[in-house]
Amino acid sequence: MIDGLPLSPRTDPHTHSSCSDGTDTPAGLMACAARAGLDVVGLTDHDTTAGWQEAAEAVATTGVALLRGTEISCADRGVTLHLLAYLFDPDDAALTEAFATARRSRQSRSRRMVELLGEDYPVTWQDVLEQAAGSHTIGRPHIADALVASGAFRDRAAAFDGPLATSSPYYVHHWALDPVEACALVRAAGGVPVAAHPRAAGRQRRLVPDETFARMAEAGLAALEVDHRDHTAAQREQARALAERLGLGVSGASDYHGWGKPNRLGEHLMPTALLERVLDEGRLGLVLP
Ligand code: AMP
Ligand code: ZN
Ligand code: FE
Ligand code: FE
């Protein structure tokens, strides 16, 4: 039982706004969450907390509670991993510095990718900046939007299937935190870390080994996001078994990005028991209507 919420709240704990690479403003996202019948929505923009305030201000009018979070870019010996962090102190010096470093590195990496792409596609850095207007965290989705605007691709997915793929010669890495260190930093800032889509293997993408999740668990990892559309049924079962083996909770989420992806709000949910644990362990509370 969570004060201010129905007995079994519908909680979608992983979404993006236009503060990173989603297409709805934070207030627009809250309105969509209300239409989708959610009781709680987690705003987890990449490497930033910039959308928290606007989303919080929309809680009263939409009636949807806000779970404040961030999706932190991590890399385990070159393999990308995303870590969701909930209810941490947004002024924590170590975390805010890591976020700023990641955002700066994402910017120079995107610029380098656009230099390479510009030799073969009609795209300039200025085009990408126009697409990313209002965003604090630039990424491949904004490059995709510029390629779509130029007429080179139909939508983001087509651009990701082409020159923006991880395996493409135009792909450039960016700096990212070590995931074990990230778990420790999130806990030190009073937050609760949950590994996002841990078994999702994009084309050619290598997976983080179980042993890394074991070390993350020791550093305070609370749960694995098992129910996510980027996991096949078999990958969900593997992730569920891994969570059980490591004594971790199991989460689920949409990873909604507005019209940037087909993911629909509420298509997967966080179990109530895990939400209760996140609220028990997090330094902040929900923003309630
Ligand atoms: P980046 O963090 O800049 O490397 O870009 C990764 C982001 O692109 C993630 O947030 C994904 O949600 C998004 N993304 C990955 N694949 C696709 C796709 N096929 N269509 C749209 N967005 C995608
Ligand atoms: Zn994204
Ligand atoms: Fe992610
Ligand atoms: Fe995400």
Image (cartoon, rainbow, N blue to C red):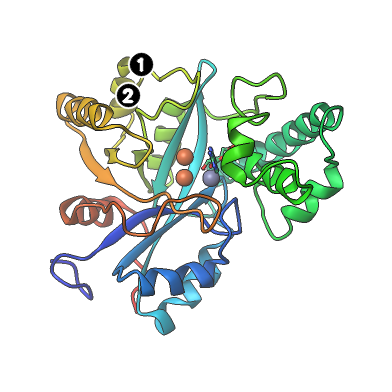
> Residue at point 26% right, 44% down?
251
Can the viewer see residue 159?
A: yes
Q: Quadrant of the C terminus?
A: bottom left
Location of residue 59 in the rendering, given as x and y in whole percent from the top left corner = 42, 76
> Residue at point 36% right, 19% down?
212
Q: Nearer the viewer, residue 174 or 288?
A: 174
C-alpha span from label 1 to label 2? 7 Å
Is 9 situated above or below 202?
below
- Do callouts 1 and 2 mark residues in contact (Cβ within 8 Å)? yes
Residue marked by disc 1? 209
Other residues around mark 2 within 10 Å, as few (<14) / some (14–19) / many (≥20):
many
Location of residue 36 in the rendering, given as x and y in whole percent from the top left corner = 34, 69
Q: Quadrant of the N terminus?
A: bottom left
Other residues around mark 1 within 10 Å, as few (<14) / some (14–19) / many (≥20):
few
> Residue at point 65% right, 28% down?
174
Location of residue 113 in the rendering, given as x and y in whole percent from the top left corner = 76, 30
Numbered circle sitting on residue 169: none
Q: Quadrant of residue 217?
A: top left
Image-based side of 277 in relation to 162, left or right: left
Image-based side of 9 in relation to 267, left or right: left
Per the image, label 1 sits on a secondary structure element best described as loop
Is 282 situated above or below 100?
below
Q: Quadrant of residue 244?
A: top left
Residue marked by disc 2? 213
